[in-house]
Image (cartoon, rainbow, N blue to C red):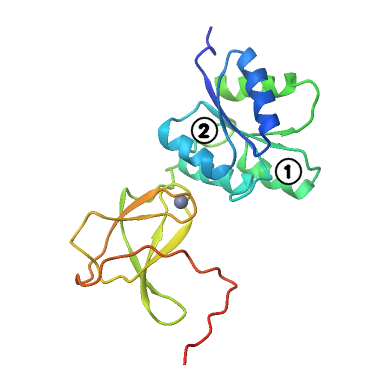
Amino acid sequence: MQNSTATILFVDDDAAMREVMALILGEEGFEVITAGDGVEALAELRRNLPDLIISDLHMPRMSGIEFLSVVRRRFPAMPAIAVSGAYDLSQSYAAGVMADAFYPKGQSHPDELIDAIRQLMYKPLKRPTNYHPCQPPKVQSARYGQDARGASLLLLTCTDCLRAFSVANVSGSEDGDLHAHCPSCGALVQFTCDVAPSVPISEVPTVEPRVQLGRVA
Ligand SMILES: [Zn+2]
């Protein structure tokens, strides 16, 4: 059968929902991979690219909207379906921009979902998919910045979740082959910088934007 090897990545923080959907989609002949949130889903995408993604919208750590927007930017041709139980029009609207279809959770007969999956998987998508993926280079050149106290730091963009983060104590180590872990998703980000070596680079958690740093006397 044509769809016997097609893989679907199903993302939902509700374990029961994941089980039920894995069962339903499995019975339809799809191979199903599940993830508990956007960060886990990005880790799955590091291993394997599915043929289609179904994502819940309300999830901890990284919302479905953000996850789907990362997917759309990094993998423009990947069909995606947004799932939500909340009858929130603005959420549905945002999901409509980031996803190819919207499926209300709790629908007793998933035939509509199965139809949408087949439609998206085996027919050309009704949107442009040929634009260049927004993918930061494998090894990026770090930008320079300062923290609230004027200490220099390096600014990087995560190649996986596309969130920006900073690395402090930047006086560099040896040339090339520098790397830092993204504080959001844990991805290893390789970068270069042209600062003179003296102090080793250390990873610091990004300061919460709303936290006001006090001046030390
Ligand atoms: Zn990341």
Residue 22, given in percent of the width and then of the height, sits at: 63, 23
SS assignment at label 2: loop
Give residue 79's position: percent from left, percent from top. 56, 31
Above or below 122: residue 159: below
Q: Which mark is residue 151?
A: none
Q: Disc 2 marks which amino acid?
A: Met
Please tell me which residue is depicted at 32% across the width and 48% down the height of the picture: 138
Q: Residue at x 63, y 44 (%)?
A: 64
Residue at the limit of the structure toward the bottom, as seen here: 217
Q: Which amino acid, mark 1?
A: Ser
Ligand 1 lies under 8 Å from the Cβ of mark 2: no
Marks 2 and 1, how far apart in space?
A: 19 Å
Q: Which residue lies furthest to the top in this view?
A: 1
Within the image, what quadrant is residue 10 found in? top right
Badge 2 is on which residue? 78
- The answer to whether residue 130 shows anywhere in this view is no
- Indicate the position of residue 179 as horizontal and vertical percent values: 30, 55
Residue 92's tag is: 1
